[in-house]
Amino acid sequence: MKNILLIGGTYFLGKAFVRLMQGVPDARLTLLHRGSGNNPETDMRRSDTAPEGIAIAEGEKTDSGKGSSVREILIDRHDTAALKQIPHEYFDAVIDFCAYAKGDIVSLLENINADIGQYIFISTSDVYMRGLGKWLKEDAPLETRAFGGAAGEYISGKVSLEEEIAGACKKKGCEYTVLRPVFIFGPDNYAPRESMYFHWINAAGQILHPADAEGEFQLVYAGDVADSIKLVIGNPESYGKAFNICKNDLYTYDRFAELLKESIDTPFQRVDTDVATVNEKGIPLPFPLTKAESNYYDGTAIKELGLKYTDDVKAMRETYKSYNKN
C-alpha cells in the first residue's frame, strides 16, 4: 500500500481507518496528534532519534504477525515550529480527520516538513446549503449563512476549509480529495446518536420515540467511511473531487426504531411522545424531526468509484456489541 500520515486518527473514524489498515502488511501509518485520544492497539516504543521537543513512538500490529507498521508523532497540528522539525519524508497521502477551523489546512501544508502526494480532507454533508428540497450532488451550492452556536461554527469551519483546500494543495504541489459523510454510526462514536438509544435500552429497556416525526435522514457505518478513504488513496479518479459518503436510502424515526429491534438482542419498548413535547422539554434527539429540517444527499459518485456498503443490521449489531464491551 502506501506511506500514510493521519492528522488525528485516535478517535472514532480515525480508529476505524487504523483498524482497517492494520490488515495491510505493507502499509505504514503515521498518526500526528496531541496525545489526548486513545492510542491504536499497537506495541509502541519510543524513538530515541526524535528531534528535541517532538515525541515519536513506533510499533507494529502483532495480531497476525504481518500487520502494518504504525508510528505516532505527538504534537499539536497548530504548533508550526514543531511541524517544521518533523524529519522530512514523502507521504503518499495525508488524511485530515481533525481540521475544523478556517486556515487549518493552509497552516498545516505550509509548515509541515514533508512532501505529499494527496491530501484527503474529511468534511461533512453539512456543508451544503439547507432547504433546497432536492437530492444534493457534489456540485450543489455550499452553505453561506452563519447559524451561530457550536453547530453553526462547525459548519462554517468545514465550508471555509473546502474553499481553501484547492489553493493550498496547488501551492504544496499535491492532489486533493474531499469526503462528505452523512450521519456516521459505529464503534467508538463520541457523538450521542446510537449510543443514546443503547443507554436507554440497557438502563431502562425502552426508548423515547417521537411518533409524529416526519424527518428523514441518512446513515453511514464508520467502517464504510474508512473503506471510502482507502478507496480514494492514490486513485486518480478521485483527484480534485468531493464525494458524498452515503447510500441513497432514507431513514425515519420509525425505521430507525425497527433497525434497533432487528440488530439488538436485548428487548425494549418504544415509549411514544410527540415532536411538540420533544421541543418543549429540549430533549436532544439526534436526527431531524421535521421535513423542513431534512436534507437529501446523492451518493452515486462514490458508489460508481467502487464503494460497497455493510448491511445496516450487521453494522448496528457490531456497534452495539462494541458499546457493551466499553
Image (spheres, helix red, strand yellow):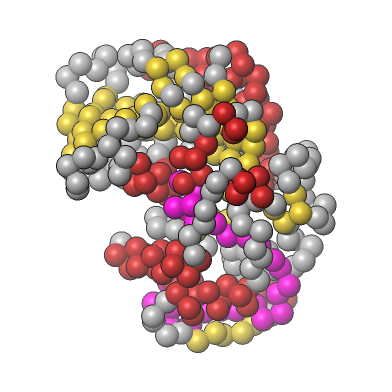
Q: Quadrant of the N terminus?
A: top left
Question: Looking at the image, which residue is at 65% across and 51% down?
Answer: 299
Q: Would you identify the image quadrant in which residue 131 lies?
A: bottom right
Residue 148, horizontal then vertical, whole percent: 70, 45
Residue 138, horizontal then vertical, whole percent: 71, 42
Question: Looking at the image, which residue is at 64% across and 37% down?
Answer: 242
Q: Would you identify the image quadrant in which residue 35 lies?
A: top left
Q: In this rendering, is residue 80 above or below 202?
A: above
Quick check: is 260 in the magenta stretch? no
Q: Nearer the viewer, residue 211 or 281?
A: 211
| Count of marks overlaid on the render | 0
Q: Nearer the viewer, residue 72 or 145?
A: 72
In the image, 10: left or right of 109? left
Q: Quadrant of the C terminus?
A: bottom left
In the image, the segment drawn in magenta is: 199-226
Q: Is residue 146 visible?
A: no
Q: In this rendering, is residue 254 above or below 51?
A: below
Residue 211, horizontal then vertical, whole percent: 67, 81
Question: Looking at the image, which residue is at 62% across and 46% down?
Answer: 304
In the image, 140: left or right of 269? right
In the image, 326: left or right of 277? left
Residue 48, horizontal then vertical, whole percent: 17, 19
Q: In this rendering, is residue 39 above or below 272?
A: above
Q: In this rendering, is residue 244 above or below 239?
A: below
